[in-house]
Image (spheres, grey):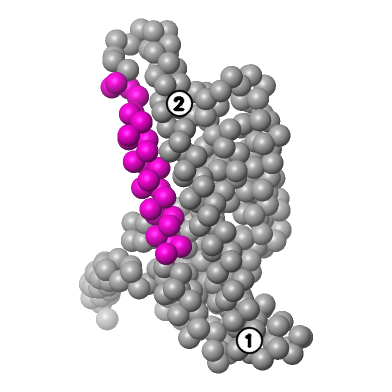
Amino acid sequence: MTTSETSLLRIQAFSLLTLAAIAVGAALHWLTPVMVPFMLALFLTVVLTPLIEMLHERLHLPRVLALVLTGVVGLAGASLLALLVVDSVGQLRASADGYIRDLEAFLQAWSARVGIDASIEELAPSADELQAWAGALASTLMGIVSQGVLVIIFMLFLVSGRSYSGTLGEVEQRIKGYVVTKGIVSSITGVATWLILWWLGIEMAPVFGLFAFLLNFIPSVGSIIGTLLPLPVLLMGGDYSTTQQVLAIALPGLMQAIVGNVLEPRMLGESMSLHPVTILLALIFWGMIWGFVGTLLATPVTAIVRILLDKLPETRPLAELMAGRLAGAEGDSAS
């Protein structure tokens, strides 16, 4: 085969791969109402299966009863999360008028200091806009919770009679380790953020703790957003001293750095094997397809794709590239 023919085949393969990726992305977006509950059920099944096995094997409960008790625990956790979301958004809406007044005063002083001639109405959002934003956020989070019935139906089918080995077993172990570890780390982050802000006397400390817990599931950028989220309240709400303002950002930021750079890597190890650039691209891709839920599931879903690609010699260089091992990818493709 000549060089020109080889180049033509590579171009054709790349074109077909691109078209296939576009078609798969469009299909996943179109199937969002079904795929999102299914993926949530899949990950919850991986997490809750050890509890089912413990109740069935160690406590000698019938498998059906163990499944029911585990479902009750899952529903209780989802209900608690829903109540926290409703309460948090209610606090945001109730405080909207006060925050707008504080924001207008802050912008008035700031614009006068820097010499900007602009009306406050142009710079500051209205209370209705802030309440609309809070309502949209609540709708997004409650939409996830409202899919609980469909998630439970999927879980029943996934749990019954499942026994994975080989590649699927490896995927299950990797995802189980990631989801459980991320859940523990996110819980530590959320509770610590809440306690720090409560100790400093910051308003809506439980709200910021809840958002820190949720945002920590989003790699890299989530922890940064969770740390800076109280900033508008610190600048515009209440009579906070400079010490309170600094500590309310510095202490959660220090805690996030320790958890994200020391605790989490030790617990996760190399279970995901994804380069930071790959994770960033995955966040953008899955976020475009499935929205907020896509950003939460981006890392484990991309890890599954990498594991599957690593099992085929033809696609192993791509898996190595996703892991950031460029030398390995080049070596495999050359052999």
Q: Position of residue 48 (x, y in %)?
A: 61, 75
Element carrying mark 1: helix
- Give the residue number, with chain letter if any, for mark 1: 65
At x 34%, y 41%, the residue is 132
Give the side of residue 97 with respect to residue 249, left or right: left
| Mark 2 residue type | Gly
Q: Is residue 108 magenta?
A: no
Q: Determine whether 86 is above or below 162 in the image.
A: above
- Give the residue number, with chain letter if any, for mark 2: 98
Q: Nearer the viewer, residue 164 or 111?
A: 111
At x 63%, y 90%, the residue is 63
Residue stretch rendered in magenta on the structure:
121-146
Q: Nearer the viewer, residue 150 or 31?
A: 150
**Of callouts 2 and 1, which one flags the residue occurring earlier in the amino acid sequence?**
1
Task: Give the crowd class for mark 1: few <14, some 14-19, many >=20 residues within 10 Å.
Answer: few
* In the image, farthest residue toward the right: 58
Q: Is residue 139 magenta?
A: yes
Q: Position of residue 282 (x, y in %)?
A: 43, 59
Q: Position of residue 217 (x, y in %)?
A: 54, 55
Q: Determine whether 334 is above or below 276 in the image.
A: below
> Marks 2 and 1: CB-CB under 8 Å?
no
Q: In what quadrant of the picture does the N terminus appear?
A: bottom left
Q: Position of residue 229 (x, y in %)?
A: 52, 37
**Magenta residues, dominant SS class:** helix
Element carrying mark 2: helix
Quadrant of res 255: top right
